[in-house]
Amino acid sequence: MSNPLVYIDQNIIGLQLDGSLNLRKRDDLVWVYSKEHFSEIRRSNDTCQYLGVLNDIGAKMLDLELNEQWQITGTAKFIEYGTPEQHYEEYLEATSDVELDDSLFDPFQVWVNGGGEEGPLRDLSENLAEQVVAITSGLPLDTSEIEEKMTSIRPQFDEMVEEMIKNGNDIKKTREAFGDGKGAIGSIAGEKQIEKIWKIISPSMSEHNVTCEQFFGFDPVDKQGYESWPPYLGIVGCCAVMDILGFQAEKKCRKMGKIQNVRSDSGHIAMGAFCSAIMSEDKRLVNRAKAIYEYKGIGTIPLLVVKQANKSN
């Protein structure tokens, strides 16, 4: 599409609903949403209203392109057909066919960020084994080898979890281990913010021979079968690292009930990288997007929408 593409965060739809914004279908730009919106809409109580806003403003859905191995290619495409309601129904149908619980590793992510409880963390290996068995049970092949493999790795997994619990998850100590004993990372501003963060923590990484690209998740050592790591996954990974370091992070990253929203934020930033601009009311999201896009040379412009307080007469 030749017109500018403006990716709207989920909170922009909320502002449209409560009358704080007046977005309209336009000929000079395209409002953009993705399946990440569907993930958030499914967790809300306003499914029809949210989808209605997307329809009313003529928003188009942007989706990641996959190759024949179902790997992310690094490009995205518009879905030209259908309405947001139809796309949402297709999304629900597609996700209902997948039995893997996408919140399975929430206890792990929350613990690493300094929150959560020991119980759910200790239940991880059992829950993972049950998920794998559930997924493979319907396959027309002998799955006994898979089940044996899961049984063999569970003790190692449990040992890793117990070691994590033994070490504790005091987020201040974690950040001190990275060289940020005074919380300087949380107040970094200006240009080249990721480079500034790396300058603080790189001394603690020197003996591990880890580069800035590797540390922030843009070029992981284990590429899980990819020849080159997709920018989308790199941005999502970088946001997870930023949560641990406390850069533009929110306390919700340490809460089980909120961690899915944190992941959605990173997904929005990653999808926004395919567009001309990304619009959000979330100041932290916009600041993270600016830092990441600048570091990776991405031309997307982050736009912060400030909601005006109602004034009484």
Image (tube, rainbow, N blue to C red):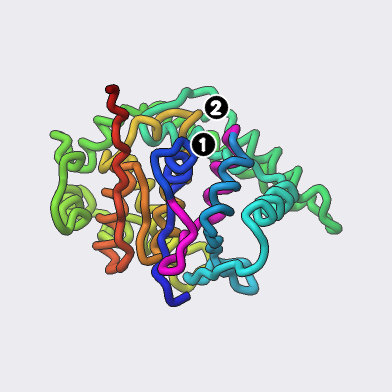
Q: Give residue 234's position: percent from left, percent from top.
A: 40, 59
Residue 245 visible in the shown view: no
Q: Is residue 25 magenta?
A: yes
Q: Residue at x 44, y 33 (%)?
A: 110
Q: Give residue 138's position: percent from left, percent from top.
A: 83, 50
> What's the residue type where badge 2 is placed?
Pro
Say which of 199 and 291 sits in front. Answer: 291
* Label located before the other in sequence (1 or 2): 1
Q: Give residue 244's position: percent from left, percent from top.
A: 32, 40
Task: Report crowding for label 1: few under 14, some 14 to 19, many 20 or more residues within 10 A (C-alpha).
Answer: many
Which of the two discs, 1 and 2, sits closer to the camera?
1
Q: Is residue 69 magenta?
A: no
- Quadrant of the image occupied by residue 12: top left
Tell whether 152 sits left or right of 284.
Answer: right
- Provide the residue designation for mark 1: 106
Dots 1 and 2: beta carbons under 8 Å?
A: yes
> What's the residue type where badge 1 is placed?
Asp
As displayed, is residue 112 above or below residue 305?
A: above
Residue pushed farthest front?
Answer: 313
Instruction: Find the distance from the CA under tag 1 to the CA under tag 2.
Output: 9 Å
- Provide the residue designation for mark 2: 120
Say which of 131 and 21 sits in front. Answer: 21
Q: Residue at x 33, y 34 (%)?
A: 250
Residue pushed farthest right?
Answer: 140
Q: Point out the stretch of residues depicted in magenta.
A: 23-45
Q: Residue at x 29, y 41 (%)?
A: 306
Label 2: element kind:
helix
Label 1: element kind:
helix
Say which of 208 and 5 sits in front. Answer: 5
